[in-house]
Amino acid sequence: MWNRIALFAVCICLSAGTALAQTPNAKEQSLEAICAATQCRAGGLEIVLRLNKDSYIPIPVGKSPFIMEDGALLIYPGETFAIQYDVVDGKPTAPRWQKSYAPQYPMKILRSDKVVDNAADQALSPIVKDKHNDKALIPPNTVLLSYGQLAGQTDMMLVFESTLPDIVKFDAVMALVAKGGGYTFKPTSTCPVANHLFELWPHPIGPIILKNIRFLPKDAELTCK
């Protein structure tokens, strides 16, 4: 039987890493405007992250955009989705919502204080793979992201698949679960993405913000930093 550890609800910023200096009404209006222009998650649930074999922590999820105002991507544990880009003057620009898929790492949620599967995942289509190379069949200039906690473990996995024409790099900010509730936001190293990449963290993490996507020069050092 898992024991619940409380986490105070927090607001994920609508710009990557900085809070909006607005009144609550202005924030709500800004969010509504963003969600009218791009896809937003509905929110209204609590994702469960395993802390150890006996304890879990609920992560509150509010209504929020997958693509934020500055083009950064916001992904929560248990989500798998694709974002498509334009490539202009050798740069990936104008991220657009493509599609949500059945999660590669399905989320657990709280319903009536019980840990259950997220029933909404059953309505999502699975990722279709190329039978010859096991790569996801996604449109050109698209990044497919899968993020979540490994089943029965505390480790977190973030998987990238890319059909962009060059090696890409993101900057990342992760929301670490803070003692006593809330999050501590911390930059984390990322690796260059050619076609397929796995990133692993050996501890529970909340949502991740991925920003500043760019192509790497042909002679760039392909190191994780």
Image: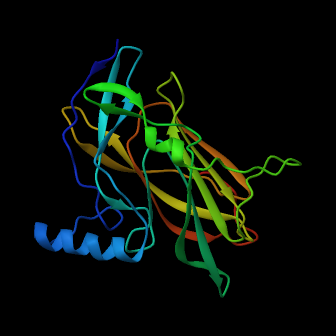
Looking at the picture, how far across and down is residue 91, in whole percent? 62, 80
Give x and y (percent) for residue 130.
82, 51
Residue drawn at (23%, 32%), measured in percent from left and top? 179
The N terminus appears in which quarter of the rendering?
top left
Q: Is residue 118 above or below residue 42?
A: above
Q: Nearer the viewer, residue 56 or 202?
A: 56
- For this orientation, the residue located farthest to the bottom is 89
x, y percent for residue 96: 53, 73
At 62% from the left and 53% from the top, the residue drawn is 191
Q: Nearer the viewer, residue 165 or 115?
A: 115
Image colouring: rainbow
Q: Nearer the viewer, residue 60 or 41?
A: 41
The image quarter in which residue 12 lies:
bottom left
Task: Residue lying at the far right in this picture: please name it.
Answer: 132
Residue 46 lies left or right of residue 124; in this view the side is left
- On screen, residue 180 versus residue 90, left or right, reads left
Residue 219 visible? The answer is yes
Which x, y percent locates residue 211?
A: 47, 65
Vertical placement of 132 versus 20: above or below?
A: above
